[in-house]
């Protein structure tokens, strides 16, 4: 028969309903795979009458997730409420205090309170599974924590937000404006009515902070993530990048440098020949550079009820196997302090697009300002098709060789002061 594990789910939205459906419809499959009978006994949601596509009438209903978490009727508490504080945090604390294992898809909560919760769980020999909190159905958490544990990770980067990737894909393929691509994403349910958390890069930052802790053994430091969103990306940027063999993606990037751990979220140019440049639509991708294995690229559904529920079920099966391990790959008490890399110390190539006044000496003056900062130029391209005869402006794209970001910013500030350009220059990092 195998052992019986009773499960309670708080939050019956898209992911919660999909998780419940899998537990009900695939009970025999899960028993065969794990040797455990995962019995859904209790649920919690604000609206009991909502049609979720499955019959939940036979289960114990709770109005309070904290009461469900503390209930003697469950062994594992699944938190799918959302929010970094409030009921979600109170319920997880209640579950741990009452000896329950926890599974959560709550990236904001893990990024904010993960260290505290990890120490509490480990002190009680309890598991916290959070595979579903990052990149939906892609098994990146377990890949870093378990499968790649023998590697020293030097860099981790990826497309961690499907909304932004969809918008950039539509802007590239059909030259839609950001606003039009966002409206389309909202109409298809890929973007929220208020999309700020996604398009401003905050969602990616939460996920990156979690991956950074796993990859480098450091305490989570969400405040140390440098964040830029995609709101200022234009079809002209995407077209200019494409002419030079690049695609633009919103990436989360974390790497170990001589001055500390660098964490950044921003639009990025990647070579169109790179595998990650081919990842389109709402799909996510995570690349991990390990000293033994080289680069590993994981690609798959980064959101959606079924894909995220798949990751929740994976965590449940791990608990069924008795896999109680340090939450972040090492005991919470031995996680290293997070030493933040120097601000603007990023070294790499840059894409710069300028609207230049079309008069003698302008291009020479711009090149001279770059040279003053020891910036070597790989390409400088005048886009004649973007020439504005009425205003006398010319669109110019510059690709630099590797240099320091602070040097680029100093040069651009001087170019602005010289009066050779209109508007703010567009500067996008290149990841190779």
Image: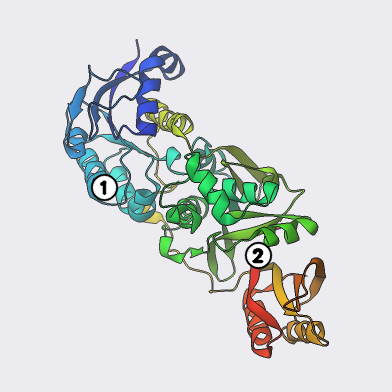
Q: Is residue 401 visible?
A: no
- Residue under circle 2? 429
Residue, x 47% and y 56% (percent of image)? 205
Q: Residues within 10 Å of mark 2 (few under 14, many from 20)?
A: many
Q: Give the quarter of the figure containing the N terminus.
A: top left
User: In the drawing, what numbered circle is on residue 333?
Assistant: none
Total numbered badges shown on the rendered structure: 2
Point out the residue furthest to the bottom here.
418
Reply above or below: 26 against 382.
above
**Helix or strand or loop: what does disc 2 sit on?**
strand
- Residue under circle 1? 89
Reply above or below: 8 against 85.
above
Comparing labels 1 and 2, the label whose residue is closer to the camera: 2
x and y percent of residue 357 in the render? 74, 81
x and y percent of residue 230 in the render? 56, 59
Point out the residue furthest to the top here.
1
Marked residue nearer the N-terminal end (1 or 2): 1
Q: Taking 288 as reference, is 199 left or right?
A: left
Q: Give the quarter of the figure containing the C terminus.
A: bottom right
Q: Is residue 165 visible?
A: yes
Residue, x 79% and y 55% (percent of image)? 245
In the foreground, 299 or 315: 299
């Amino acid at each position: 028969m195998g052992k019986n594990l009773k499960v309670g789910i708080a939050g019956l939205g898209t992911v919660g309903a999909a998780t419940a459906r899998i537990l009900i419809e695939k009970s025999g499959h899960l028993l065969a795979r794990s040797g455990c009978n995962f019995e859904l006994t209790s649920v919690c949601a604000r609206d009991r009458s909502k049609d979720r596509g499955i019959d939940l009438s036979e289960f114990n209903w709770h109005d309070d997730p904290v009461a469900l978490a503390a209930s003697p009727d469950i062994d594992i508490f699944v938190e799918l409420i959302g929010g970094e504080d409030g009921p979600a945090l109170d319920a997880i604390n209640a579950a741990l205090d009452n000896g329950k294992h926890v599974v959560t898809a709550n990236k904001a909560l893990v990024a904010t309170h993960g260290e505290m919760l990890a120490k509490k769980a480990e002190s009680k020999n309890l598991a916290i599974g959070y595979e579903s909190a990052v990149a939906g159905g892609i098994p990146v958490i377990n890949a870093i924590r378990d499968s790649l544990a023998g590697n020293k990770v030097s860099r981790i980067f990826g497309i961690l937000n499907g909304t932004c990737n969809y918008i950039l894909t539509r802007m590239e393929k059909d030259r839609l404006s950001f606003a039009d691509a966002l409206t389309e994403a909202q109409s298809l349910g890929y973007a929220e009515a208020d999309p700020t958390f996604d398009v401003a890069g905050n969602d990616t930052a939460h996920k990156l902070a979690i991956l950074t802790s796993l990859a480098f053994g450091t305490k989570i430091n969400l405040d140390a993530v440098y964040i830029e969103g995609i709101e200022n990306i234009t079809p002209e940027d995407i077209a200019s990048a494409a002419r030079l063999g690049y695609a633009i993606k919103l990436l989360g990037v974390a790497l170990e440098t001589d001055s500390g751990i660098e964490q950044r979220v921003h639009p990025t140019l990647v070579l169109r020949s790179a595998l990650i440049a081919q990842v389109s639509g709402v799909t996510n991708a995570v690349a991990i550079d390990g000293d033994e294995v080289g680069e590993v690229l994981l690609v798959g559904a980064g959101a959606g009820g079924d894909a995220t529920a798949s990751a929740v079920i994976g965590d449940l099966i791990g608990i069924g196997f008795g896999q109680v391990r340090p939450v972040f790959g090492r005991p919470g008490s031995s996680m290293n302090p997070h030493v933040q890399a120097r601000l603007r110390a990023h070294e790499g190539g840059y894409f710069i697009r300028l609207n230049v006044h079309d008069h003698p000496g302008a291009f020479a003056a711009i090149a001279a300002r770059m040279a003053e900062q020891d910036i070597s130029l790989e390409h400088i391209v005048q886009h004649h098709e973007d020439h504005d005869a009425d205003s006398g402006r010319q669109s110019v794209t510059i690709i630099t060789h590797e240099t320091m970001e602070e040097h680029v910013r100093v040069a651009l500030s001087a170019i602005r002061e010289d009066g050779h350009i209109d508007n703010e220059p567009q500067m996008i990092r290149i990841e190779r």
